[in-house]
Amino acid sequence: MNHESNTIPIVGARPGNGENRAGARPAGDSEGQARLGSKAHITLVNMNLLYIRLDDRIDYEAHPPLGLLYLTSVLEQKGFSVDLVDYQILPRIRRDADPFDLDTALRYIGETAGIVGFSCMANLLPFTILVAERLKQLHPEKTILLGGVGPFGVEPLILERFSWIDIVVQGEAENTLPHLLKVLPDMGGLSRIPGIFYRRADGSVHHTGRVHRICDLDTLPLPAYHRIDMGAYDAFGIVTSRGCPYACRFCSVAPVWDRSTTYRSHDNIIAEIRLLHETYGVTTILFQDEFFYSSEAKILDFCDSLQASGLQVRWKCYGRVNLVTERAMKRMAQTGCTQLRFGIESGSDRVLKKVVKGFSVRDSLESVTIALGIFDSVETFFIWGFPFEDMDEFYETALQMARFRQMGVTVLPSLFSMLPQTDIYREYHKGSYDGALTLVPELVPIYVVTGHEIVDTWNAVPDNYRPYYDFIGAHADIFPGFFLFNHETNVLPKYKALREMGFA
Amino acid sequence: MKKKSIKKRLIPTLLATVYTLPALAGGDDQINNGQQPMQETSKTTISSEAIKQEVIQLLRKGETDLVTLNLAGQPGTYFRVHYSPTGEDGSYALVPEGEGVVGDNGFGAISFELKKLGKDEVYLKVTTSDTADFLKTRMTPKPMILEVEPVQVKERGVIEELRDSLRQKEVRTPSAVAGVRG
C-alpha cells in the first residue's frame, strides 16, 4: 500500500459494477433520489462503508443501507419526511475523493434537516463522531443523533466526552425515532422516550431504558428501496432475522440483540425478493443475517416457499456447521443457493471451547467438506489473535485454514477485535487476561478502511490521518476495537506466520 | 526467571506449510526414485481430489531441534514420514515413530529430533494412504529440506527486528517450499 499520496487507492470505485447489474428504477421515478435537505423532518446519514483488502489493493463494495432503509419506510409510513444520505456512494460519484477527509464528508452530506441521525458500525465510529463534530460546529442549532451498532455499549461515554452528540439511540430505532421526532427539538420530553441516552440539563447522562424488541418483523414495511439509486450498488442483501441465540464470547451480535432472535415469515421474505427481482432486476441475493439457517425444518420450508414462488434467483447465506445437514444443503442448492458461509473461527478445540462457539473442529471439517461438494462456493471466516490463544493453538488454526484453502474453500482470516460489547472485552476489563491493549497505528495505517483488520504493515501514517489516531488513542475505552492485545507477542509473530503462508 | 526463559525457548516457529498432491501412482515407489511427471487431470477430478489432499505443517520448538510435523487431511488417512541426510535416491528411511493417522478432527502429528536424522540438512518426504497397508499412496512431490542448525528465534520485545523482517517481506522458508503447490 502506497501512502505517499493522500488518497486511498480504492480500486472498486466504479459505477454499477455489481454482479447483479441492478439499476432499473420504478417507472415514473426518474428523480426518486432527490434530496429533501432542510425540508425534511430528519436527515439520516449512513456511514457504514464496506472495504475489502485484496492483496495490496483495497476493493470497495456498496450495499443498500438496510438499517436506514427500514427506518425510512417506518418514518414515511408515520407521516415523517426523511432526507436520506448514503455516504457509501461517495466513491461512485467522486472517484478521486478521499472518503476519510472530513471536509469531503461535510460537503457530501450538504444541507440537512434540523435533526441529523448518523448510523455506523464500530469501525467508522471515530470518523463518524468527528464528522458530527464538524457539522455541529457549522450548525450548532442542529440536533445530532447517533445510532447503529457502532455506539452500542459505549453510549454514556460518548455523551460524557463528546458534547456535540445530543442523543444516542440504542436498539431498534423503528420503535424509537417516531416518538423522538414528535418530541424534538424540545429536549425536555426526552425522558418519556424509551431506548435513548441523552444529556440532562445538569450535564449528567440519562438512559431511558431498553426499548421493547419488535417481536414480529413482518409488521415492518419493506426497506425503502425507492429512495436510493439501486444502480449504484454492487450487492443486495436481505435481513430475515435479527439477533443470534449463541453466546460466542468474541461476537457483538448476540449481546446487541440480547441473545434473542426475531424472525420474518417466509412469505414476507419472498415478497422482498420479488420486489428486488421484478422491480430492480436483482438476480443474486445475500441473506445477511447470522441466523438465517436456524434449523433444518425451517430452511427446508423456506426452500419450498421459494420454489413455489417461481422466482428464479440465486442466493447466498450464512450457516452454522453444527446446524447444517446434507439434506438441507442439497435442497438449498436445488433452489438457487450458490454459496454458503461459515464462521469457523478457530482450528483449535480448546479455543472453540473458550469462545463458547458450540461446535468442534471435527464438526467444521465434516460440514465444510459436505458443503464443498454441494455449492459452487464455500466461504469460511477465521479469527486469530484471541488473548488466550497460544502459538500452538494459532498454528492449529493456520493449518486448518491451509487445509481448507487447499480443498478449494475461500478462507477469510480476521484479527480478533476487542469490541466493547463482547464478553471477552468485559473479561479483559476485569483483568482476566495478562496483557494490555496498545494502539499501533503503523499496523492499521488506514484503520478507517476496515477498522478491525491489519491491512498493511509498518507504513508511515499519512499526516492527514494522524489526528484520527490521536483521537482514538485518547479514548481507548470507547474505541477498544482498534487496539491490539499484546501486539509484540500475540499479534506480530502470528501475523508474520500468516504472511509466510500467504494469508496476509 | 528461569521458567520464563524456558517458555520463550519453546515458542514454536513455523518452518513451512506445504501441500501434498495425490500421487498419480505408487507413491512408495517414488521415495527412493525420481519424481513422476504430472499428468493432466480434468477440473472435476481436481476438485474431488482436492478433498483428499493433505496439508503439512512443520513447526520447530524455539531453539531446540524438536520438530513437529502436523498433517491435516480427511480423518482416517494414514501417513508415513521418511527422511534422508543427503536427499539422494535410495537414501530415505522411515523417521523413528514416523507413522500416524489423521484423527476425527482432521489432524495428525509426529515429532522428532532433527539432530538425530542428519548433520546439516534433513530431507523429508511424506506418504499418505487411505488404508493402513499403504497399497495406494500419495506423496509430497519433492522433499522438504530442513536445516539442522537452530533457527534464530527472535527475542520477545525486539519489535524492530520483527518489523524489519515484515518490511522486507522476507520469508525464510516459503510456503511453496519443495516446489509443492498450494
Image: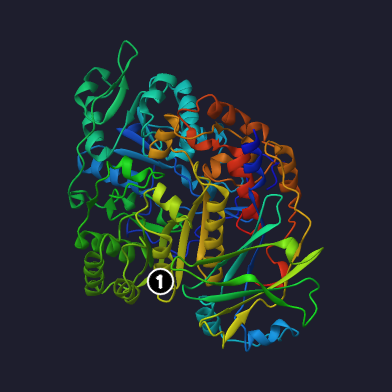
Q: Quadrant of residue B72?
A: bottom right
Q: Is residue A30 visible?
A: yes
In the rendered image, which quarter contains the C terminus of chain B? bottom right
Q: Nearer the viewer, residue A149 or B108?
A: B108
Q: Nearer the viewer, residue A329 or A57?
A: A329
Q: Is residue A56 visible?
A: no
Chain holding disc 1: A
Q: Nearer the viewer, residue A110 or A198?
A: A198
- Residue lying at 49% horizontally and 43% vertically, measured from the top left: A388
Q: Is residue A295 above or below residue A136?
A: below
- Residue lying at 45% horizontally and 65% vertically, measured from the top left: B105
**Amino acid tagged 1:** Ala
Image coords of residue A154 (percent x, y): 39, 29
Residue B102 as seen in the image, left or right of residue B82: left
Q: Quadrant of residue A457?
A: top right
In the rendered image, which quarter contains the N terminus of chain B? top right
- Residue lying at 60% horizontally and 50% vertically, measured from the top left: A10
User: Please, what secondary structure does the residue beneath circle 1 have?
Assistant: helix
Image coords of residue A435 (percent x, y): 54, 33
Residue under pointer 1: A371
Q: Residue furthest top?
A: A202
Q: Nearer the viewer, residue B144 or B39?
A: B144
